[in-house]
Image (tube, helix red, strand yellow):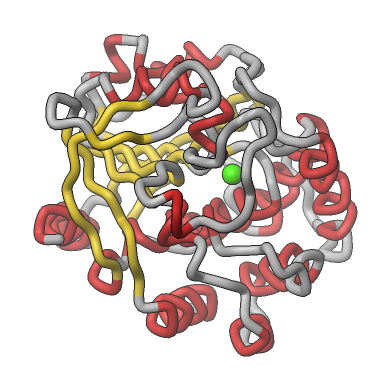
């Protein structure tokens, strides 16, 4: 716990003068759009780029949703990079199609003064966006794009910390979202691209996994939904969560990942050494291994407190 608190403590102190640069990379689902929305509400960070991999989404509606939200939040100076490299194991088509419904629903929040946003299809050119300071990377999808970026020496040299929604260390606690073709021992974001996940794990970059275990205990409760504020950010949450809040399987996966970065004090973490299985039915599994790289594993959270903190943040 202390390691991460220190990390964020220094972020918070520094932020009063100089917002911490962050790159968020996501895979375009509604949950990702909300994670991005929440991140953009914090004034102590500076989002210098958004990277979109259409893994749990279809590219066109996901990209248009990102552009729509950046316009709604008047953050149109943030460049968007599209990573078109395919993943290994695709998300189910029915999940990806949800991105059309997300985009359609967002149209109920019209844009008054539309501003074009720079969309760059050459991910390697993200080096042009790198600041002098080190950068936090948040990934709420498979690690495909991040592995690509970490193959660029200038990017690796800038990584302060990587936060990833992925990893599963106690498969027996996970009773749903079993990947087809997999044995259920892995998180979706790892199963989707095990080779990239393994590349990032072995890159030597400091890595925190917001695991399947912790995300599975945070639901979108009626109390949380009803208290979403009437701010622009709150309305975006209301619209996207409004499409799924009745679904019994739905959890706060990617949003929780961003919330962890800012509120680590209400989470429980531990340190593990592990490897990632890259082949066979367990591919994507994070398996404890004494000889593997050390990672920070987020495994529990005070649900009531994190709900309150997110609601407060969206109210400001
Ligand atoms: Ca995602």
Q: Residue at x 37, y 21 (%)?
A: 198
Pick the front one: 165 or 17: 165
Left/right placement of residue 281 relative to residue 205 reads right
- Residue 290, position in %: x, y? 13, 31
Residue 217's spot in the image, x, y percent? 48, 69
Residue nearest the observer in this picture, 211 or 236: 211
What residue is at 46 percent from the left and 52 percent from the top? Answer: 212
Residue 158 showing in the rendered view:
yes
Compared to residue 263, the image places residue 17 above or below, namely above
**Image-based side of 60 in relation to 162, left or right:** right
Residue in the image at 41% along x and 45% along y: 168
Q: Position of residue 305 (x, y in %)?
A: 38, 82
Give the x, y percent position of residue 206.
Answer: 21, 35
Q: Quadrant of residue 26?
A: top right
Q: In terms of image quarters, where does ligand 1 lie? A: top right
Query: Is 22 on the left or on the right of 292, as rendered?
Result: right
């Amino acid at each position: 716990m202390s390691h991460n608190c220190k990390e964020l403590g220094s972020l918070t102190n520094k932020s009063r003068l100089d917002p911490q640069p962050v790159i968020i990379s996501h895979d375009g689902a509604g949950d990702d759009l909300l994670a991005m929305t929440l991140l953009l509400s914090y004034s102590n960070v500076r989002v210098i780029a958004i990277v979109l991999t259409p893994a749990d989404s279809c590219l066109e509606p996901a990209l248009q949703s990102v552009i729509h939200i950046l316009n709604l939040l008047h953050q149109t100076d943030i460049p968007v990079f599209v990573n078109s490299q395919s993943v290994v194991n695709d998300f189910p088509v029915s999940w990806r199609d949800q991105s059309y419904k997300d985009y359609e629903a967002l149209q109920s929040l019209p844009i008054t003064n539309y501003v074009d946003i720079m969309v760059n299809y050459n991910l390697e050119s993200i080096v042009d966006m790198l600041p002098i300071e080190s950068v936090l990377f948040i990934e709420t999808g498979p690690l495909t794009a991040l592995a690509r970026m970490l193959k660029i020496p200038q990017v690796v040299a800038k990584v302060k910390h990587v936060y990833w929604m992925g990893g599963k260390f106690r498969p027996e606690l996970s009773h749903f979202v079993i990947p087809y073709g997999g044995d259920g021992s892995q998180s979706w974001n790892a199963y989707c691209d095990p080779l990239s996940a393994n590349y990032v794990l072995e890159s030597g970059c400091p890595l925190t996994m917001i695991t399947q275990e912790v995300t599975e205990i945070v639901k979108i409760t009626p109390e949380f939904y009803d208290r979403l504020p009437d701010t622009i950010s709150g309305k975006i949450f209301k619209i996207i969560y409004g499409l799924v809040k009745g679904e019994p399987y739905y959890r706060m996966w990617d949003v929780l990942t961003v919330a962890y970065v800012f509120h680590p004090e209400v989470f429980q973490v531990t340190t593990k050494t592990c490897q990632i299985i890259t082949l066979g039915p367990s591919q994507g599994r994070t398996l404890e291994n004494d000889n593997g790289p050390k990672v920070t594993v987020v495994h529990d959270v005070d649900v009531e407190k994190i709900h309150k903190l997110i609601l407060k943040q969206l109210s400001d």
